[in-house]
Amino acid sequence: MELSSAALYIVPTPIGNMNDITLRALTVLEQVDLICAEDTRHTGKLLAHHNVTTQTMSVHDHNERQRVQTLVNKLEQGQSIALVSDAGTPLISDPGYHLVNGIRAAGFPVVPLPGACAAITALSGAGVATDRFCFEGFLVAKSVGRQTQLRALQSESRTMVFYESPRRVVSTIEDMVAIFGDDRHIVLARELTKTFETIHGAPAAQLLEWLNSDENNRRGEMVVMVSGYKKDDESITPEVIDALKLLATELPLKKAAALVAKLYDEKKNALYKVGLELGL
């Protein structure tokens, strides 16, 4: 395989098991002039494992914008460059957007390689609906902001995929129980491709109990997959209820129910009944 000169290659790396890397990825890493790595020490271990001796340069959240022109200059000199993250596919909840955008804007080709991605790996083994899903990445660290994000997803019908750290996973699942309810099915995948790989699914409240039952269940990087909202024939979505609450602060309940029913194609009497139950 002969590489194109003056091109940026996006190279996925293993998410755990060192052998989960494609032959093409190894060829690219061996043949490029420079490897841009989120953490050169971390990537160095992978390169050493596969006997790759290519020079590396750090490109991470704090210096990415400053590196763009330097790397464009190298491309102008005919050099080829690979971009890797610490694990998985670069740019998927990892740095690289500014670099890729800047290099494309400068007129140089960007060549993405297929490979390891924690979200896709988790989905394939979780037993959740995968015909439609949305990737939400990491939620914000503080509970108030996190609950606001989750509340905006209450009516999302697709499977939702999140990344989470071991130190925050319990508080995140607690917030999911509060917003999505005890019975929403959630699957947690941890330590994917590693010795203690675990994929465990349960209703939200039961999953929280499982997490708290053993500290080992909270170790490792997490992928959290939440089943989408399913509307029963008689149910009214949280989004519609929120709209009813908002309008009822300015209008009589009967008028608010009529307007929301028209906007969301719901039954006026059912909305009026819900409003009475909520004390609007």
Image (tube, grey):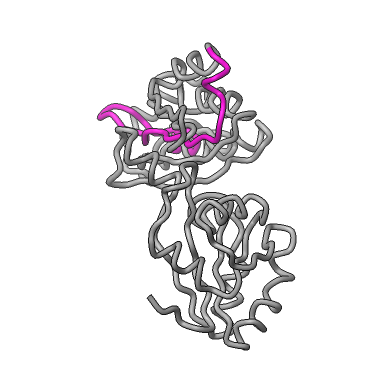
In this picture, residue 59 sits left or right of residue 104: right
Question: Residue at (68%, 58%) from the top-left corner?
Answer: 60
Q: Nearer the viewer, residue 167 or 264?
A: 167
- Report how many numbered discs are placed on residues in the image: 0
Magenta span includes 101: no
* Magenta stretch bounds: 214-243
Q: Position of residue 169 (x, y in %)?
A: 57, 28
* Residue 255 seen in the current view: no
User: In the rendered view, would you say 2 is above or below 264?
Assistant: below
Residue at 54%, 62% (x, y): give it: 52
Seen as rendered, the residue at the extreme top is 213
* Residue 243 horizontal/vertical position (percent): 49, 39
Identified at 32% across, 36% down, the residue is 125
Give the answer, above or below, for where 211 lies relative to 25.
above
User: Does residue 10 show up?
Assistant: yes
Q: Relative to residue 270, is residue 254 drawn left or right?
A: right
Figure check: 253 above or below 68 = above
* Residue 134 picture location, percent across and down: 41, 47
Using the image, determine if residue 122 lies above or below residue 58. Answer: above
Residue that lies at the very extreme toward the left in this rendered image? 233
| Residue 158 percent across, percent down from the top left | 36, 42
Instruction: Check residue 224 for magenta coloring.
Output: yes
Q: Which residue is situated farthest in the front direction here?
A: 51
**In front here: 46 or 152?**
46
Residue 266 falls in which quadrant of the image?
top left
For the residue pair 159 and 89, the one nearer the viewer reads as 89
User: Is the N terminus in the top left, top right, bottom left or bottom right quadrant?
Assistant: bottom left
Image position of 112 (left or right of 216): left
